[in-house]
Amino acid sequence: MRSARYRFNVLIAVVFVSGFAQGMLLPLLAILLEKAGVSSGVNGLSASAFYIGILLISPFIEKPLHTFGYKKLIVTGIAVTCVSVLVLPLWQAIWFWFILRVIIGIGDHIFHFATQVWLTSMSAEKKRGRNIAIYGVSFGLGFGIGPVMTRLVDIHYALPFMIAAALCILSLVFLIKIDNEYPENITTPDVQSTWKRYGKVFRMSWAGLLGTFGYGFIETAVHSNFPVYAIRQGLGVEAVSILLPAFAVGALIFQVPLGLLSDRFGRKPILIISLLIGGLSFLAMNVNNSLVYLTVMFVIAGLFLGSLFSMGITYMADLLPRELLPAGNILAGICFSLGSIFGPLIGGFSIQFFEEGSIFYTIGGMMLLLFTALIFFKPIRSTQSVAGDV
């Protein structure tokens, strides 16, 4: 049997692949559709297909997790993603890509759901912030490298897709070596009790879910809308390949420090500070449109907003008893996908119908709205220490 530390390291390494695939596909497909003459609104709608897939699969994955265990769900999710990525370059049609993006969203969420529940349940509370932050760093590293692949289309149209698929296959090789495990079982005799449980989870942990919603909103608005905005403002693809990784660099630098700070001072105050500074940094991007200034501001925004998902998941796990973590992670995925759908839709139409800089006002305004809501949250249940393996 492999050790808990080995299993943790494999999961952290494998999540890099998911981040890489997402980070590559969002700007790459947005740029290709923009060059094909697709409107920014329709482009944003196409980007939301990935997160529609998350919404579609979310109500149906808790039971398979209990039936088949973590490992089998992770392998299934990666396999679905791998096949879909390989099919993407075969035909450039917006409806065809929309369907494939829905399927990729389904596969990716199956993988992330199982991985997040496994990590949160195996982590001791005093180390949970650090562990989930490391998870976020690995995903963010892949997400930051992904946009660089947009340049490879000049070598061969299918090359970025082939690289992403190869990494998926490599991750499956590592997964074979870890043992399967199952979450703690709970009694759910009927559908009504299931929905009541989700309602209870939401009432107890909606503050943590705000973090996952906010990250979904900013991730897709930045990676799907900003490339379109940059091209229309004359910044070009080269600027996109610099600014998007700049956001990821900020997230990588501060992900673990924020996790450690939240372990020491609490999740809520760190989330509040992050939303405030991150929101203001986006509003400040309207002051100057030079590449150097925007790069600095993207790094600052990444420092404080790049950890929203990991901090939100960690806060949610703190607020819930261990047997409700699968349901909590389902709601986290739903909130993330809702934010990810609203992000490109609102951002895309703001670019299409309003003045220059509206994308920055849209993102900054949403972060400050979440900041205001979080201030008024009062936990229903005091956090309890939970034993863990790592």
Image (cartoon, grey):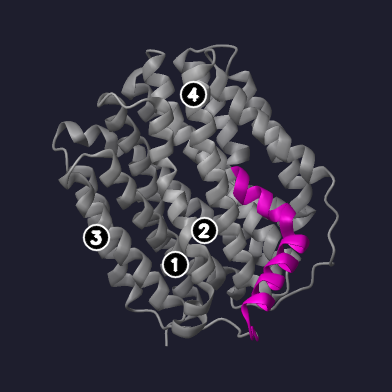
Q: Nearer the viewer, residue 88 or 226?
A: 88
- Quadrant for the C terminus, please: bottom right
Q: Nearer the viewer, residue 154 or 360?
A: 360
Do callouts 2 and 3 mark residues in contact (Cβ within 8 Å)? no
Q: Position of residue 361 (x, y in %)?
A: 61, 23
Residue on which disc 4 sits: 295
Do callouts 1 and 2 mark residues in contact (Cβ within 8 Å)? yes
**Residue appearing at x 43%, y 21% in the figure:** 229
Q: Amino acid at mark 4?
A: Thr
Find numbered disc 2 in the image and state the secondary structure of the residue it sits on: helix
Do callouts 2 and 4 mark residues in contact (Cβ within 8 Å)? no
Q: First in sequence, mark 3 or 1: give its number.
A: 1
- Quadrant for the N terminus, please: bottom left
Q: Residues within 10 Å of mark 3 (few under 14, many from 20)?
A: some
Find numbered disc 1 in the image and state the secondary structure of the residue it sits on: helix
Marks 1 and 2, Cα distance to the nearest angstrom? 8 Å
Residue 83 marker: 3
Q: Describe residue 231's horizontal placement relative to residue 324 as left or right.
A: left
Q: Position of residue 57 (x, y in %)?
A: 46, 63
Residue on which disc 2 sits: 135
Q: Amino acid at mark 3?
A: Val
Q: Amino acid at mark 1?
A: Leu
**Residue appearing at x 45%, y 27% in the figure:** 226
Classify 304 as above or below 138: above
**Residue appearing at x 37%, y 13% in the figure:** 234
Q: Nearer the viewer, mark 2 or mark 3?
A: 3
Residue on which disc 1 sits: 11
Question: Which segment is the magenta one?
Answer: 187-214
Find numbered disc 3 in the image and state the secondary structure of the residue it sits on: helix
Q: Is residue 204 magenta?
A: yes
Marks 3 and 4, Cα distance to the nearest angstrom? 35 Å
